C-alpha cells in the first residue's frame, strides 16, 4: 500500500490538481480521478462523510473545472486511515492535528536527508 501523503489545511505544491481530459495518468497515484460517489462506494462510507472531511480540512481533494471533488489514490488511502482513526474513537480535530504533525515530521526528515546528502559531497 502506498505511503499516505500528508494532508491538512492549505494546498501545498505537491497537491494533486485535476488535469484536462486525456492528460491524467492512470498510473500516477496523485492523479485526481475518482468522484465522491466512486470513493464512497469503494470504501463503504457515506458521501456526506467525504464532504465533511473536506469541510473540516482533514482530506481535501482536488476540484474539477466544474467544482466537483476529485480524489486521487493517495487521498483514498488517507480517507481509509481517517475512518480507521475515527473507529478508534478519535475526533476529526485530533485527526487533523495528527496529520499536520505527521506532515511536519515528513518535511523535517526530508530536510535532514537533504542536509546529510549535502555534507557527504
Image (cartoon, rainbow, N blue to C red):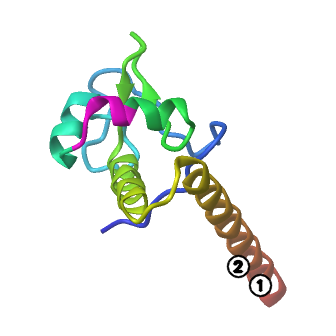
Along the horizontal axis of the image, is 91 left or right of 117? left
Q: Which residue is mark 2?
A: 113
Is disc 1 placed on a helix, strand or loop? helix
Residue sitting nearer the eye, 85 or 68: 85
Q: 10 above or below 8? A: above
Q: 80 above or below 38? A: below
Say which quadrant the C terminus sits in.
bottom right
Q: 109 above or below 95? A: below
Kindly identify the residue that appears in the image at 39 percent across and 27 percent down. 19
Residue sitting nearer the eye, 60 or 111: 60
Is disc 2 placed on a helix, strand or loop? helix
Residue sitting nearer the eye, 57 or 106: 57
Q: 103 above or below 52? A: below
Along the horizontal axis of the image, is 120 left or right of 4? right
Do labels 2 and 1 touch, CB within 8 Å? yes
Kindly identify the residue that appears in the image at 36 percent across and 65 percent down. 2
Instruction: Single out the residue that lies furthest toward the right.
Output: 119
Kindly identify the residue that appears in the image at 43 percent across and 62 percent down. 85
Q: Which residue is mark 1?
A: 116
Q: Residues within 10 Å of mark 2 (few under 14, many from 20)?
A: few
Q: From which residue to which does the magenta span run?
A: 45-50
Kindly identify the residue that appears in the image at 26 percent across and 26 percent down. 22
Amino acid at each position: 500500500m502506498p505511503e499516505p501523503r500528508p494532508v491538512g489545511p492549505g494546498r501545498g505544491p505537491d497537491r494533486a490538481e485535476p488535469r484536462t481530459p486525456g492528460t491524467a495518468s492512470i498510473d500516477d497515484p496523485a492523479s485526481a480521478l475518482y468522484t465522491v460517489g466512486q470513493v464512497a462506494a469503494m470504501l463503504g462510507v457515506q458521501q456526506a462523510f467525504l464532504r465533511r472531511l473536506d469541510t473540516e480540512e482533514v482530506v481535501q481533494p482536488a476540484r474539477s473545472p466544474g467544482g466537483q471533488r476529485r480524489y486521487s489514490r493517495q487521498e483514498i488511502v488517507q480517507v481509509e486511515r481517517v475512518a480507521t482513526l475515527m473507529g478508534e474513537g478519535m475526533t476529526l480535530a485530533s485527526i487533523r492535528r495528527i496529520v499536520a504533525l505527521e506532515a511536519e515530521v515528513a518535511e523535517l526528515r526530508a530536510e535532514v536527508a537533504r542536509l546529510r546528502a549535502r555534507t557527504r559531497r
